[in-house]
Image (tube, rainbow, N blue to C red):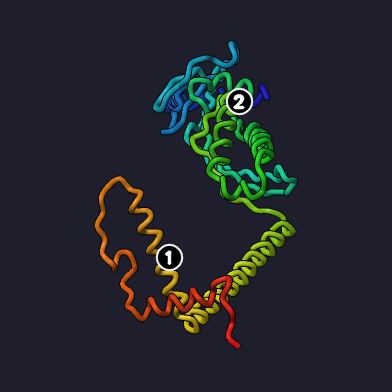
Amino acid sequence: MAKNIKDMAGRLSSMPKGFGIGARLLIGAGIIGYGIKESIFTVDGGHRAIMFSRIGGIQDTIYPEGLHFRIPWFQYPIIYDIRSKPRRITSLTGSKDLQMVNISLRVLSRPLSDKLPAMYQRLGVDYDERVLPSVCNEVLKSVVAKFNASQLITQRSQVSMMVYKLLTDRALDFNIILDDVSITDLSFSKEYAAAVEAKQVAQQEAQRAQFIVEKAKQERQQKALKENPGYLKLRRIRAAQNVAKTVSQAQNRVYLNANSLLLNLSENDFNLLDEILAKNAPGAKKKK
């Protein structure tokens, strides 16, 4: 190896003097260019950088967006993306009434830019892979266990708010900010879904039967009124009595006409009423 270097030096010395100077200048310019290239680094938009020194370790300085300098070989930058990143997490957990629930959560997370040196020493660059799956599963299981299966559907906004609050507090312990937490999917086991469907069908059948009974009652009442028109007139007189009693007990003076009191009955109506009352009297004898 040493012999080859001596041969190359001898060839360069044997070449013309101008060529040797040009080659040296070219090599020197290449070394300088490489040194400049290795001495600068760029932080893109939406990113932050921290510096690792081979002498002092992680430095506390946080580098914003733009062009920065470093000492080659002794220092190298560690760049973080501080923009919100979406992540979907699915968890299978049990409700308060022991129903298995498959719940999916969408989380928008980003690191706390002021704590990047401590985050790198504690979690590294892949902080979301290390923290979010375990924390989200823990929070989801604790929240879902407080609600019944039906409450998870009817009180979904309350469940989502509780998950967001607990998950935000837990993530701050790891210097992670959660911009949004939302429940994207909520499903139950096949057996529970079949039971809910059967219950709905039974309720619909019960409502239909009740409607049929009410319809039969209405038809029977209408038929009775057609066969006995005096009954309707009797009801109108009793209603008029109730109205008159209420008005008489009031402190204000009220004037009502016969139409308002439902007393606009002809003489024939009164005769018919007397006949009905006579027939329904306790001591009345039925004609044979």
Residue 125: x percent and y percent? Answer: 59, 29
Residue 136: x percent and y percent? Answer: 64, 36
Residue 239: x percent and y percent? Answer: 41, 64
Front one among 116 and 226: 226
The mark found on residue 238 in the picture is 1
Decide: is 265 above or below 154.
Answer: below
The secondary structure type at the circle numbered 1 is helix
Label 2: how many Cα within 10 Å (few below 14, some 14–19, many 20+): few
Q: Tag 2: residue type?
A: Asp
Front one among 50 and 228: 228
The secondary structure type at the circle numbered 2 is helix
Asked if the residues shown at circle 2 and circle 1 are in contact, with their CB atoms under 8 angstroms apart, the answer is: no
The mark found on residue 7 in the picture is 2
Which quadrant of the figure contains the N terminus? Answer: top right
Decide: is 139 above or below 99.
Answer: above
Decide: is 171 above or below 141.
Answer: above
